[in-house]
Amino acid sequence: MSSDPKDIIARLQQWDACDVADGLSKLKYPNGGFLEGLTMYSPQFQAGETKIVGQAMTVKFVPKSDISSPKVQGNYIDKILEGAVVFISQPLPHVNAVYGGLMTLRAQALNAAGVVIDGRVRDLNEHRALNFPLFAKSVGTTAGGEVCRPSEVNVPVRLNSENQDAWIKPGDYIIADLNGVVRLPQELAEQVLDAIPAIADADIKCAEAIKAGYSVEEAFREFRGR
């Protein structure tokens, strides 16, 4: 199979975030690639059929007081490539919002697949009016300029988490829907896509068996081999 990103994305579109996580779990990848704490806020809150699939464009924010870190030339939002999933890393504490409605206007104009914010978002009505896919940790009212600033684009960023040591790298595949956000490393994409169909087929057979009166234990033993 081709490893071309466009082909990988087209194949990933067939599956949801749970399917991809199952494939990664089959490969013993930590947490099945799930990135905890990120929730769909737009176009609806945790509802509907919205799914985004694309390669990560990472944006690292730093505290405003950090004068030693690099500075982004121009505005990061203008650097989006078509089909990218913009992954924004906001430094703790997450009090102010780091992303608002004007940014979505530009992201949509550049045909971004969606935005994932490891931090706060604001202007929810504006994102929803544009039917734009957006995932975040939480919502706020106040812009982030007084507390943080964009520092680097397309560098590895660490998920703000006490429970996971998860890094998002530029070009990683991001799959997100109402179940959550999954990071698929580029180097594992082919293996995961090869693994998913058999797992999904086993689940379908388990469901049919349970409807037919099997116990879960019986269905799992016959179709999952355990």
Image: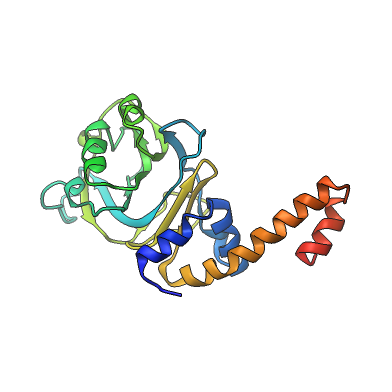
Residue 166 in the image: state x and y as whole percent.
46, 58
Q: Quadrant of the C terminus?
A: bottom right
Q: Is residue 97 above or below residue 70?
A: above
In the rendered image of this protein, does residue 44 appear above or below residue 197? above
Residue 25: name its quadrant. bottom right
Residue 223 appears in view: yes
Q: Position of residue 123 (x, y in %)?
A: 31, 27
- Taking the image as shown, residue 210 lies to the left or right of residue 131, namely right
Q: Residue at x 47, y 61 (%)?
A: 11
Instruction: Please report the residue visible at 23 percent of the width from the left and 35 percent of the height from the top.
Output: 105
Position of residue 196 measured from the top left corner of the image (x, y, whole percent): 59, 63
Q: Residue at x 46, y 45 (%)?
A: 51
Q: Which color scheme did the rendering employ for the protein?
A: rainbow
Residue toward you, 220 or 35: 220
Q: Relative to 26, is 210 on the left or the right? A: right
Front position in the image: 204 or 64: 204
Residue 157 appears at what percent x and percent y? 34, 57
167 or 102, nearer to the observer: 102
